[in-house]
Image (cartoon, helix red, strand yellow):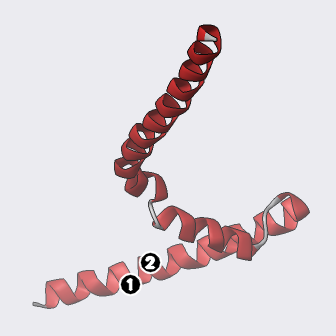
Amino acid sequence: MKYFQAVSKIATIILQDADTQLDALIKVQREVAGNALPSESKINVEVAYNKMNFFDNSKNHLGWFGVIGNFLCSIVFLKKVTKILKQQDH
């Protein structure tokens, strides 16, 4: 049991060190890049957008949009063809 406690303590120390290094890296990037980096709020919005999996969730629905769009285009095409044919008859 002491082994797992020791490993847990080591992992906690390593993660804390990694967080500290990451914070330092972000600080340096902000200082060097200046306005080239997007703001924190824009980054947070993009992260939230990516977590929504918009494209993964919508690929099932896009097929139906294609079928419905194709059907509507076919109706418009047929209306135009029948209008042209009626004009040729007169």
Residue at 56 percent across and 19 percent down: it is 81
Q: Quadrant of residue 47?
A: bottom right
Which residue is outermost to the left? Answer: 1
**Nearest to the observer: residue 90 or residue 53:** 90
Disc 2 crowd, CA 10 A, few/some/many (<14, 14-19, 20+): few
* Left/right of residue 1 with respect to residue 37 in the rendered view: left
The secondary element bearing badge 2 is classed as helix
Q: Which residue is mark 2?
A: 15
Residue occupying image coordinates x 57% and y 13% = 85
Q: Position of residue 38 (x, y in %)?
A: 78, 64
Q: Amino acid at mark 1?
A: Thr
Would you say 37 lies left or right of 2 here? right
Classify mark 1: residues with Cα within 10 Å, few (<14), some (14-19) or many (20+): few
- The residue depicted at 46 percent of the width and 66 percent of the height is 52
Q: Are marks 2 and 1 in contact (CB under 8 Å)?
A: yes
In the picture shown, does residue 17 fall above or below 78?
A: below
Relative to 39, 60 lies left or right: left
Could you say where residue 27 lies in the image, as x and y percent from the top left?
76, 73
Which quadrant is home to the N terminus? bottom left
Q: Find residue 9 and report its horizontal and vertical position in percent.
A: 32, 87
Q: What amino acid does circle 2 point to? A: Leu
Q: CA distance from mark 2 to mark 1?
A: 5 Å
Read off the residue under disc 1: 12
66 over 38 or under it: above or below: above
